[in-house]
Image (tube, helix red, strand yellow):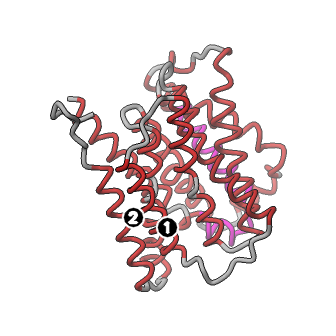
Amino acid sequence: MKGKNNALSVALILLAATGWGVIGLFSRPLGEAGLSAIQVTFVRSVITLAGMGLLLLARDRTLFRIDLRDGWMFLGTGLVSIVFFNVCYFTTIEMTTLATASILLYTAPCFVMVMSAVFFKERITARKLTALALAFGGCVLVSGIGAGGGLTPFGLLTGVGSGLGYATYSIFGKAALKKYHAFTLIFYTFVVSTVCLAPFVGIGQCARAIAAGGNAPWLALGLGLISTFMPYVCYTTGLENVEAGRASVLAFAEPMVATLAGIVAYHERLGARSAAGIALIFIAILLLSIPAKNREGTTP
């Protein structure tokens, strides 16, 4: 039964990475409709918060209950993992190339592995390190980095900060899941992020841009439901049975999916370098998807 739960959790994490990977199909046209990066983040938060609220009302209202002494967990996921991460990431994008920003973001699994070893006593195995190296190398190839990015020290700082912020969701989330249901964690994560973002987005202007943007309302729903609500539900649920370090490497499927989405939706070219990168990421995912057998012959 445990092996089946593990396999399902891996599948959920890969499904989450797929949802995150197609975010550009929604965020790019919303940006063209006049929404800033912070406004796009706010739209994601509001729709996910509404969706989780309705889900908790329909499923089990006791899931709204939390101990205020555990507020640090939700402040961590909402303020650090959502708000801090997005601010750092969008700042890095403005200061350097998208490829460079993407590579710095995917330093996250390194942080997750180290923090998981410290806080959760997860072992840093040779298989994890091999998969991390393969996935990171694949991400470098897919991003096309190497053509220059004009990276400044501050850009490096914000880029690594985005990776650290991205990583903390797995850490704070793993801690919260020891006591709370995955849906409770997601709901209060987006309560915090929505409240923190609200003063800075210009809610009226954001609403007008969506209303006047033709397909923008549907794109906003897609952004919130397909690329935020669904992935966070899947990833957080998957974390219950998968080590945080392993989950963070499996999430490397995101840039692979993003590249394929660009090819299908925007007819972007797939060069040999990108194809090789996708192959490396796929091998890394396979490496972590196949359960390792311990000395007794049972899966961990």
Residue at 75 percent of width and 77 percent of height: 150
Residue at 43 percent of width and 67 percent of height: 256
Residue 207 seen in this snapshot: no
| Quadrant of res 186 | top right
Placement of the N terminus among the 4 image quadrants: top left
| Quadrant of res 235 | top left
Which residue is under mark 2?
281
How far from the left and from the top, in percent, is residue 55?
A: 48, 31
Against 165, residue 192 (above or below) is: above
Q: CA distance from mark 2 to mark 1?
A: 7 Å
How far from the left and from the top, in percent, is residue 60?
A: 45, 20
Query: Does the stretch in magenta take in 63?
Result: no
Residue at 54 percent of width and 41 percent of height: 114
User: Type of residue at label 1?
Assistant: Cys
How far from the left and from the top, in percent, is residue 138?
A: 44, 69
Which residue is under mark 1?
139
Q: Which residues are magenta?
A: 27-54
